[in-house]
Image (spheres, coloured by chain):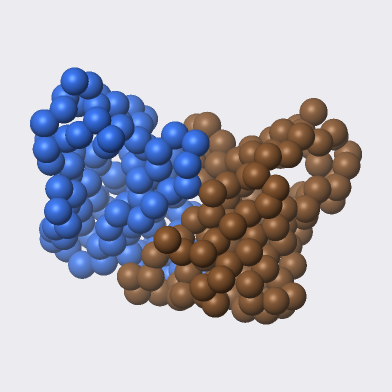
Chain colours: A blue, B brown
Amino acid sequence: GQNIDQPTEMTATEGAIVQINCTYQTSGFNGLFWYQQHAGEAPTFLSYNVLDGLEEKGRFSSFLSRSKGYSYLLLKELQMKDSASYLCAVRDDNAGNMLTFGGGTRLMVKP
Amino acid sequence: DAGITQSPRHKVTETGTPVTLRCHQTENHRYMYWYRQDPGHGLRLIHYSYGVKDTDKGEVSDGYSVSRSKTEDFLLTLESATSSQTSVYFCAISESATGSYEQYFGPGTRLTVT
């Protein structure tokens, strides 16, 4: 089986930087995804990591360390519209390459 | 945006009644998925399909069945709804289940079983 842990809630200030962590345990790691989900809406894709290191995409970056079973999503220059839940999902090739999602981190951005 | 729709968007039904949710895509993607999302549990996979008439179980498949008779449609059926199946149901599609191919999600169906 898999175990994916993320903090339940975080609060940050507009214009600041926030780091959302995700730790996982899986037998056949084959990629990690981050999704954003605004309240009442569908999740939307943010980033994908399969090799160690940092992937940067505008204000958002995602980091992966396979040896530590650890990833983080870094959000810079926070805006009010970044208030949402952020979902970490791991693909396991011992589970038919299906995604297993963490419980999500609800981020509240305050003025 | 990926062309993926779900119907109905909201439904209230009574315990013991059958319910069918529909997912429709216009992207011709091979893979289709049904998830449920509940507070404290995140998204959990119910069933998925890797082609017409090819389906498999996910993590929480008990009480659910699926069918895919056409590439574009994936149906989720609750044969006899129970209150524990009150949830938000998301359909997702992807071109592949490997590499960087992400899943695109539909708008969701909020189901309440009374």
Q: Where is residue B113 in the image (x, y as percent from the top left)?
A: 77, 33
Residue B96, quarter of the rendered image: bottom left
- Position of residue B57 in the picture relative to residue A22 (left or right): right
Q: Where is residue B108 in the image (x, y as percent from the top left)?
A: 58, 47
Can residue B4 be seen in the rendering of this structure?
yes
A41 shown above or below B113: below
B113 shown above or below B36: above
Q: Which residue is drawn at 52% across and 32% down?
A: B39
**Number of dots carrying numbers:** 0
Q: Which residue is drawn at 26% across and 66% down?
A: A50
Can residue A7 be seen in the rendering of this structure?
no
Q: Which quadrant, please, contains the C terminus of chain A?
A: top left
- Position of residue B111 in the picture relative to residue B108 (left or right): right
- Position of residue A47 in the picture relative to residue B22 (left or right): left
B99 shown above or below A16: below
Which residue is at the front of the view, B66 or A90? B66
Q: Which residue is drawn at 33% across and 27% down?
A: A9
Q: Position of residue A107 (x, y in %)?
A: 30, 31
Instruction: Report the residue that reaches farthest toward the top.
Output: A111
- Position of residue A74 in the picture relative to residue B48 (left or right): left
